[in-house]
Image: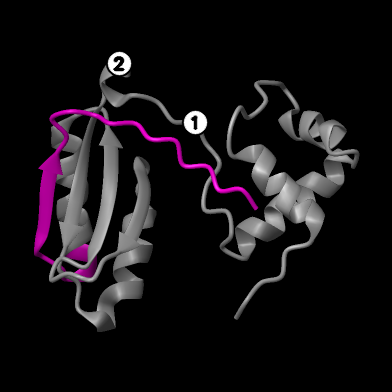
Amino acid sequence: MKIMLDPLDKAILNRIQTRFPLSPRPFAVIAEELATTEKEVLERVARLKADGIIRRIGGNFVPGKVGFVSTLCAAQVPEAKLELFARAVNTFPGVTHNYLRDNAFNVWFTFIAPSKTIITDHLARIAKRTGVTRILNLPATHVFKIKAKFDL
């Protein structure tokens, strides 16, 4: 099912990707910039989130600078378990993204947590919940930050 975005949806999506307002009412700031109401922005963001267009709204930080660790994970997930596995992975705080690849290890995701032990524990819990046991834990040795902004 293709979701149709109108010009205001696109303007909101473009605006929230970078330099999110640090304000007690950030959506009011965005609404003012886009000549609409805070209520309208909040309703549209909620709809876009419910439709799966927006996965999360949150800050990005360099894990090591705040005492956290990060890892890239790759899992061999049977096609019949893809949805279950993705849902399970996405319930954990610290999962920043989760995507399919055309590879034997077909689901890749990143994890950020306060310690390697917590990540190891979370991966074991994911395996137990889903029955998927082939999960590689590939800890970051060097962090590369890229800007991913999608102009709608």
Would residue 15 be found to the left or right of residue 31 on screen? left
Crowd rating for badge 2 (residues with CA inside 10 Å; few <14, some 14–19, many 20+): few
Quadrant including the N terminus:
bottom right
Q: Residues within 10 Å of mark 1 (few under 14, many from 20)?
A: few
Quadrant of residue 50 within the rendered picture = bottom right
> Judging from the image, what secondary structure is the residue with disc 2 in?
helix
At 23% from the left and 69% from the top, the residue drawn is 130
Instruction: Give residue 29's position: percent from left, percent from top.
Output: 79, 28
Is 12 included in the stretch rendered in magenta?
Answer: no
Q: Which mark is residue 27?
A: none
Relative depth, front residue between 120 and 15:
15
Name the residue beneath numbered marker 2: 65
Find residue 66 and report its horizontal and vertical position in percent. 32, 17
Query: Could you tell me which secondary element the residue under label 1 belongs to?
Result: loop
Front residue of 89 and 102: 102
Give the mark, 2 or 1, whose residue is nearer the N terminus: 1
The range drawn in magenta is: 128-152
Residue 20 appears at what percent x and percent y? Answer: 63, 30
Position of residue 35 relative to residue 23, above or below, is below
The residue that disc 1 covers is 59
Colouring rule applied to residues: one colour
Residue drawn at (19%, 72%), measured in percent from left and top? 77
Kind of residue indicated by mark 1: Gly
Q: Nearer the viewer, residue 50 or 8?
A: 8
Instruction: Please say whether residue 136 is one of the residues in the magenta stretch.
Output: yes
Q: Residue at x 13, y 35 (%)?
A: 117
Which residue lies most toward the front here? 151
The vertical placement of 98 against 115, above or below, is: below
Give percent across and percent down for residue 60.
44, 31
What secondary structure is the stretch in magenta mostly built from?
Answer: loop
